[in-house]
Image: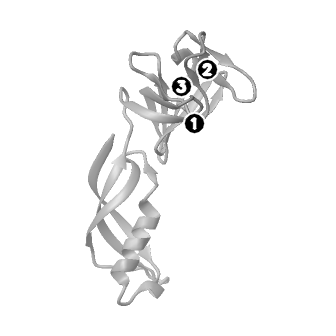
Amino acid sequence: MFFHMVLERNLLLHPRYFGPHLRENLVMKLMKDVEGTCSGRHGFVVAITAVDGIGKGEIREGTGFVTFPVTYQCVLFRPFKGEVLEAVVTMVNKMGFFAEAGPVQIFVSSHLIPDDMDFQTGDMPNYTTSDGSVKIQNDSEVRLKIIGTRVDAKEIFCIGTIKDNFLGVINDPNAAV
């Protein structure tokens, strides 16, 4: 799920970036340091939408660096248990498959795939129904439900299922159009 939050961060800036473009340099450093990162508490930072305020800098003794407190607004992505997401399959093996929904990687175990789908080996491993009408392979788009999350300090891991109503393949890249 996506959230819009106000966060604060202390930025350390080298003296060579001081001058008439100090604010632009701070905003660029903030975007470089924060966008695309993950915190276990808030989730993945997708984008910074606004910089609300830059406080007075404090000089670090002995280095010349200055620490600026910066308040900013950002869009966050954090998956929750029970949430339904659309994801792209990245890897298929006999244990299940991995899929990506934005920055989060989701594992779907073979026990959480419908019973009528069997694993097929070969040059392109996949899960196929007995009649061959539905196939889960690399680059397939699936709708899945998150049944568990584990949050670390810098990463979020998810377990999903497609063994429920209205879940499963929504787009097969190799299907004839």
Amino acid identity at mark 2? Tyr
- Residue, disc 2: 127
Residue 37 seen from this side: yes
**Nearest to the observer: residue 25 or residue 169:** 169
Say if 14 sits above or below 94 in the image: below
The disc placed on residue 77 is none
- The residue that appears at 60% across and 10% down in the rendered structure is 130
Q: Is residue 147 visible?
A: no
Disc 3 to disc 2, C-alpha distance: 12 Å
**Label 3: which secondary element:** strand
Residue at position x 39%, y 16% from top?
Answer: 165
Task: Give residue 139's mark.
Answer: 1
- Badge 1 or badge 2: first in the primary sequence: 2
What is the C-alpha distance between the residues marked 3 and 1?
Answer: 15 Å
Q: Point out the residue furthest to the left here.
A: 52
Describe the element under mark 2 as helix, strand or loop.
strand
**Horizontal side, residue 8 vs residue 149: left or right:** left
Pointer 3 with pointer 2, Cβ within 8 A: no
Outermost residue, bottom side: 19
Measure the alpha-carbon separation of dots 1 and 2: 13 Å
Residue 22 position (above or below residue 74):
below
Q: Which residue is mark 3?
A: 108
**Pointer 1 local density, CA inside 10 Å: few below 14, some 14–19, many at least 20:** some
Would you identify the image quadrant in which residue 31 lies?
A: bottom left
